[in-house]
């Protein structure tokens, strides 16, 4: 897989095709929204989804860690789809997660789905700061410091010759960096949505996830943005 580098808050960050962010200077892997055990949560309401999302998401995480070998993980919330997800996980998947975390400094930032819950032996917190960068689950529109966040599962669409391609994406401004969801069963919010208006601007950059790389959509191919911004402008 091919990472794409970007400069953010004076630091070089690598955008990984998995949706994770690798901060090589601190050997830190940052990701959010795994939503482990989402499928099993739907079973309780009679919606029977294939129960393989947790195993596949953990396999993807293990592969990224094997590739990048981070010393530290920062998990930006909604690692679990709900507070009972850990109890529903199979012993095999629990062991997989523990093995991934073993020997790595792990920072658990609480999300809205898994608020106040982390696996036994770990501690959650509302936010984390490093090198002047604040990291939290949901972006704060009033924040003036550089901020990395998750929560919205952003996606972008490009159109070419009658074909539309929709992919998860990173969104970057001068002071904000929004990560796509890492989980395999999470869906996405269009990057033009009004909920993401703090990120809409002429200098905003969108980086879409490809199968094996991360790419910036060519100007003129991205769908028209909200607020009258020109396509390709962010």
Image (spheres, rainbow, N blue to C red):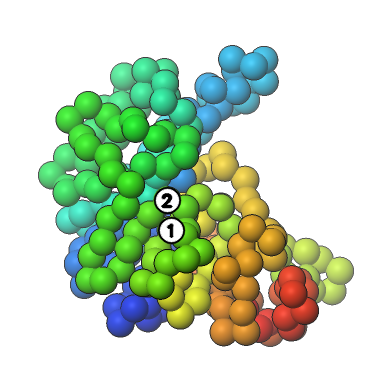
Quadrant the C terminus occupies: bottom right
Q: Is residue 72 left or right of residue 12?
A: left
Q: Is residue 191 above or below residue 75?
A: below
The residue drawn where x is 37% and y is 81% is 7
First in sequence: mark 1 vs mark 2 = 2
Determine the residue located farthest toward the left in the rendered image: 103
The residue carrying mark 2 is 137
Quadrant the N terminus occupies: bottom left
Q: Is residue 76 above or below residue 231?
A: above
Q: Is residue 46 above or below residue 144?
A: above
Residue 168: x and y in percent read 58, 58
The residue drawn where x is 17% and y is 48% is 104
The residue drawn where x is 69% and y is 60% is 193
Q: Is residue 159 visible?
A: yes
The alpha-carbon separation of the residues under discs 1 and 2 comes to: 5 Å
Count of picture labels: 2
Q: Nearer the viewer, residue 219 or 111?
A: 111
Q: Nearer the viewer, residue 85 or 9?
A: 9
Determine the residue located farthest toward the front in the rendered image: 142
Q: Is residue 14 left or right of residue 212?
A: left
| Badge 2: residue crowd in 10 Å (few <14, some 14–19, many ≥20) | many
SS class of the residue under badge 1? strand
The residue carrying mark 1 is 149
Q: Is residue 3 visible?
A: no
Residue 129: x and y in percent read 26, 61
The residue drawn where x is 34% and y is 59% is 135
SS class of the residue under badge 2? loop
Q: Nearer the viewer, residue 85 or 109?
A: 109
Q: Are the two marked residues, 1 and 2, in contact with CB atoms closer than 8 angstroms?
A: yes
Residue 58: x and y in percent read 38, 39
User: Residue 78 appears in which quarter of the rendering?
Assistant: top left
């Amino acid at each position: 897989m091919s990472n794409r580098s970007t400069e953010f808050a004076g630091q070089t960050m690598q955008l990984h095709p998995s949706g994770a962010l690798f901060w090589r200077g601190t050997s830190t892997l940052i990701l959010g929204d795994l939503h482990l055990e989402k499928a099993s949560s739907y079973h309780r309401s009679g919606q029977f989804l294939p129960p393989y999302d947790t195993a596949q998401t953990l396999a993807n995480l293990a592969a990224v860690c094997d590739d990048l070998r981070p010393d530290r993980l920062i998990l930006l919330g909604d690692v679990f789809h709900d507070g009972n997800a850990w109890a529903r996980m199979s012993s095999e998947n629990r062991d997989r997660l523990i093995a991934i975390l073993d020997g790595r400094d792990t920072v658990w930032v609480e999300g809205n789905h898994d608020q106040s819950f982390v696996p036994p032996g770990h501690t959650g917190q509302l936010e984390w700061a490093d090198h002047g960068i604040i990291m939290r689950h949901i972006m704060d529109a009033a924040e003036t410091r550089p901020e990395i966040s998750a929560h919205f599962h952003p996606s972008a669409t490009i159109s070419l010759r009658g074909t539309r391609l929709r992919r998860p994406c990173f969104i970057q401004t001068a002071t904000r960096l929004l990560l796509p969801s890492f989980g395999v069963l999470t869906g996405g919010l269009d990057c033009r949505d009004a909920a993401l208006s703090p990120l809409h601007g002429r200098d905003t950059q969108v980086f879409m996830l490809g199968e094996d790389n991360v790419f910036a959509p060519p100007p003129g191919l991205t769908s028209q943005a909200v607020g009258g911004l020109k396509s390709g402008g962010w």
